[in-house]
Image (spheres, rainbow, N blue to C red):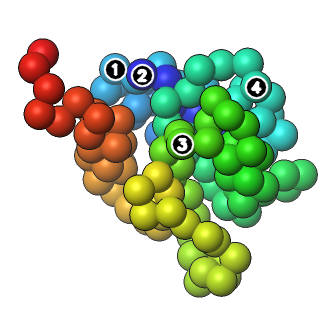
Amino acid sequence: MDILLIDDNPDYLTLLRDALHANGYTVHTAKDGIEGCEILESAQIDLIISDIRMPRFDGLKVHAFAREMESHKDTKFIFISAFKDAYRGMMNLDGKRDFFLEKTTPVNDILKMVDTLVFSAFEGAWI
């Protein structure tokens, strides 16, 4: 399973990348939305995790870009930010494919959410 992780904070990006990788995910990283969109154009991504507030191209623009692409119109998307209240009126979230986490969310809780979103399609299936 491939995850695109976008964040302009290199320490946070490394922390989440390492945790996701340790859980068996292939992680593509980008330091801003422009890099993230370039990855979306060239890779098969199963889940997008993006900061909202970033220079050059923010997470809301990445979300809009992904939703315009046929290949990513239904890809699960997790916004992760310390500025939820600042963006509350600007986010148009679909409860089945768009989610929000505070940056203060413990990494283990983020991993649980990722596992749930990625593997929910297999719920009830024989493996």
Circle 4/circle 3 CB separation < 8 Å = no
- Seen from the viewer's position, the closer of residues 19 and 70 is 70
Q: Quadrant of the N terminus?
A: top left
The answer for how far apart the CA atoms under marks 4 and 3 are is 15 Å
Inspect the image, locate mark 1, and give the three-letter code of the amino acid beneath it: Gly
The answer for how far apart the CA atoms under marks 3 and 2 are is 15 Å
Q: Is 93 placed above or below 29 here?
A: below
- Between disc 4 and disc 1, whose residue precedes? 1
Left or right: where 73 falls relative to 46: right
Query: What residue appears at the point 77 percent right and 36 percent down from the top-left corner?
Result: 37
Inspect the image, locate mark 3, and give the three-letter code of the amino acid beneath it: Asp
Query: What residue appears at the point 32 percent right and 49 percent down from the top-left corner?
Result: 113
- Between disc 3 and disc 2, whose residue precedes? 2
The answer for how far apart the CA atoms under marks 4 and 1 are is 23 Å
- Between disc 2 and disc 4, whose residue precedes? 2
Query: What residue appears at the point 11 percent right and 33 percent down from the top-left corner?
Result: 124
| Residue denoted by label 4 | 41
Query: What residue appears at the point 26 percent right and 39 percent down from the top-left corner?
Result: 120
Circle 2/circle 4 CB separation < 8 Å = no
SS for dot 1: loop
| Residue denoted by label 1 | 24
Q: Position of residue 36 (x, y in %)?
A: 73, 36
- Between disc 4 and disc 3, whose residue precedes? 4
